[in-house]
Image (cartoon, helix red, strand yellow):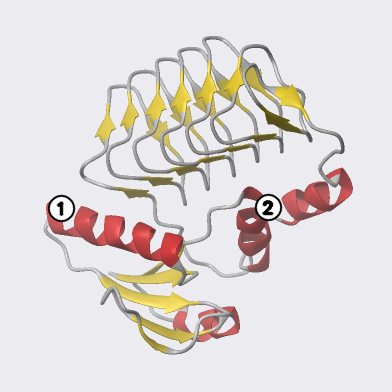
């Protein structure tokens, strides 16, 4: 299988490393090529593979019959924009789960999503498409994490939590049981959500409180519709 990794910065290399480990655990080959508009061409220092060009070259490589796309960007709005940009390609998106992640029974993970090493998804968890669950996250029973959401490392979701579309939870953020985090919102690093958070806003602190200003809703809606 040939994997076309979208992005080549540090996060993309972490996803690719996880994919390589996943392929090894499953006993199948894994050929990686990276595409990034901002990273110079040539082999990456990690040794995971070469940067062969920008995103405009994806179309040429999409002719490979056994190719899959790998989402190597982690910020929700950037993910949505990339998926929209590549929506015309008739290629599947790989779902990447590092073998060191623990996935319990009745857990579903959508196409294009990533679960990093050390993360635990317990039981009856629903993860949407293009979701990032980074290193050492905890996703407890009956949680729902919707499309394009991102959990940065060491995020802890208690049971019965809903993370709506496009939300971003910073490193070490905590959501207590039964709380809903609204769409395209940001919960800052180390913040604790103790009550429902409205969408399109940024929250910090313990308990989490809103900062002035809102996400540019019109731009996000346009990107979401395109994807």
Looking at the image, is 114 positioned above or below residue 172? below
Residue 96: give x, y in percent of width and height: 35, 51
Residue under label 1? 26
Instruction: Give residue 167's quadrant in the image.
Output: top right
Q: Residue at x 71, y 27 (%)?
A: 182
- Marks counted in the figure total 2
Q: Quadrant of the N terminus?
A: bottom left
Q: CA distance from mark 1 to mark 2?
A: 32 Å
Looking at the image, is 9 positioned above or below residue 201? below
Q: Nearer the viewer, mark 1 or mark 2?
A: 2
Q: Residue at x 28, y 22 (%)?
A: 105
Q: Secondary structure at mark 2?
A: helix
Residue under label 2? 77
Q: Earlier in the sequence, mark 1 or mark 2?
A: 1
Residue 78: give x, y in percent of width and height: 64, 58
Tell me: 146 left or right of 28: right
Residue 197: give x, y in percent of width and height: 72, 21
Q: Quadrant of the C terminus?
A: bottom right
Front in this rendered view, residue 211 or 225 = 211
> Crowding at label 1, few (<14), some or many (≥20) Cα neighbours within 10 Å?
few
Q: Residue at x 85, y 38 (%)?
A: 214
Looking at the image, is 197 positioned above or below residue 111? above
> Crowding at label 2, few (<14), some or many (≥20) Cα neighbours within 10 Å?
many
Tell me: 173 left or right of 204: left
Residue 120: give x, y in percent of width and height: 31, 29
Q: Residue at x 16, y 62 (%)?
A: 28
> Do callouts 1 and 2 mark residues in contact (Cβ within 8 Å)?
no
Looking at the image, is 148 positioned above or below residue 58? above
Front in this rendered view, residue 86 or 12 = 12
Instruction: Give residue 195's quadrant in the image.
Output: top right
């Amino acid at each position: 299988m040939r994997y076309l990794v979208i992005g080549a910065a540090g996060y993309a290399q972490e996803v690719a490393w996880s994919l390589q480990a996943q392929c090894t655990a499953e006993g199948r080959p894994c050929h990686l090529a990276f595409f990034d508009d901002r990273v110079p061409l040539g082999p990456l220092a990690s040794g995971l593979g070469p940067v062969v060009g920008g995103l405009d070259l994806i179309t040429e490589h999409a002719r490979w019959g056994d190719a899959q796309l790998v989402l190597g960007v982690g910020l929700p709005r950037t993910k949505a924009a990339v998926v929209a940009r590549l929506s015309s390609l008739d290629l599947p998106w790989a779902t990447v789960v590092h073998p060191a992640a623990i996935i319990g029974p009745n857990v579903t993970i959508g196409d294009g999503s990533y679960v990093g090493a050390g993360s635990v998804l317990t039981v009856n968890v629903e993860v949407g498409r293009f979701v990032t669950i980074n290193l050492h996250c905890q996703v407890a029973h009956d949680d729902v994490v919707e499309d394009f959401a991102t959990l940065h490392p060491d995020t802890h979701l208690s049971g019965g939590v809903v993370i709506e579309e496009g939300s971003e939870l910073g490193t070490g953020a905590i959501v207590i049981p039964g709380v809903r985090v609204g769409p395209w919102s940001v919960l800052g690093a180390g913040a604790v959500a103790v009550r429902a958070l409205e969408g399109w806003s940024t929250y910090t602190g313990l308990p989490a409180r809103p900062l002035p200003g809102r996400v540019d809703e019109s731009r996000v809606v346009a990107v979401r519709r395109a994807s």
